């Protein structure tokens, strides 16, 4: 049930994130507003992180499974928790962003809001990358069980 709810949230957010504004055909060169540029940057970061959510979940599960009966269970569980935290940060950001951003904001309000959101997304990206790298490193370094040889 939890997976269905998460999937519904991700799908609804991805539909909400689509830009339905008509493309401008300006032969003299279209000038894009600062807020539009920032929004694109924020969503580009978002779009880079989203595909990593599933691998992060799988790695989290592998680390949790590896922790059972292991002398290094704290190491595995810490890495699993880091992945969980990174995924939760992304889900929380999506909920907050979709509820806070409005096209009715002034240009100045949009710019201020989107600059803050860009910083948040950069932190989430960094957190996600670090958690993935460390989790994979720990799992790769895991000793192979003798009975699996």
Image: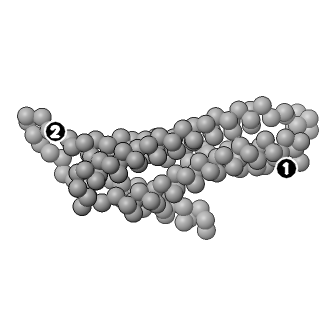
Residue 28 lies in quadrant: top left
Location of residue 30 in the rendering, given as x and y in whole percent from the top left corner: 14, 38
Residue topped by disc 1: 68
**Which residue occupies 36% across, 45% down?**
115
Q: What numbered label is drawn on residue 31? A: 2
**Which residue occupies 54% across, 38% down?**
126
Residue 63 horizontal side relative to residue 43, left or right: right
What crowding class fits label 1: few (fewer than 14 Cα within 10 Å), some (14-19), or many (20 or more)?
few
In terms of secondary structure, where does tag 2 sit?
loop
Image quadrant holding the N terminus, namely: bottom right
Location of residue 3 in the rendering, given as x and y in whole percent from the top left corner: 59, 62
Residue reaching furthest to the bottom: 1
Residue 66 lies in quadrant: top right
Above or below, comparing residue 88 to residue 127 in the picture: below
In terms of secondary structure, where does tag 1 sit?
loop
Q: Pointers 2 and 1 in contact (CB under 8 A)?
A: no
């Amino acid at each position: 049930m939890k997976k269905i709810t998460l999937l519904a949230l991700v799908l609804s957010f991805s539909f909400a994130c689509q830009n339905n504004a008509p493309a401008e055909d300006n032969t003299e060169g279209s000038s894009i507003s600062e807020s539009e540029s920032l929004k694109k940057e924020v969503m580009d970061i978002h779009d880079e992180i989203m595909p990593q959510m599933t691998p992060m979940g799988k790695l989290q599960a592998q680390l949790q499974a590896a922790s059972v009966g292991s002398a290094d269970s704290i190491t595995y569980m810490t890495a699993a928790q880091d992945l969980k935290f990174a995924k939760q940060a992304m889900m929380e950001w999506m909920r907050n962003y979709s509820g806070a951003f409005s096209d009715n904001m002034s240009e100045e309000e949009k710019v201020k809001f989107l600059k803050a959101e860009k910083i948040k997304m950069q932190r989430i990206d960094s957190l996600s990358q670090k958690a993935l790298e460390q989790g994979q490193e720990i799992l790769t370094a895991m000793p192979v069980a003798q009975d699996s040889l």
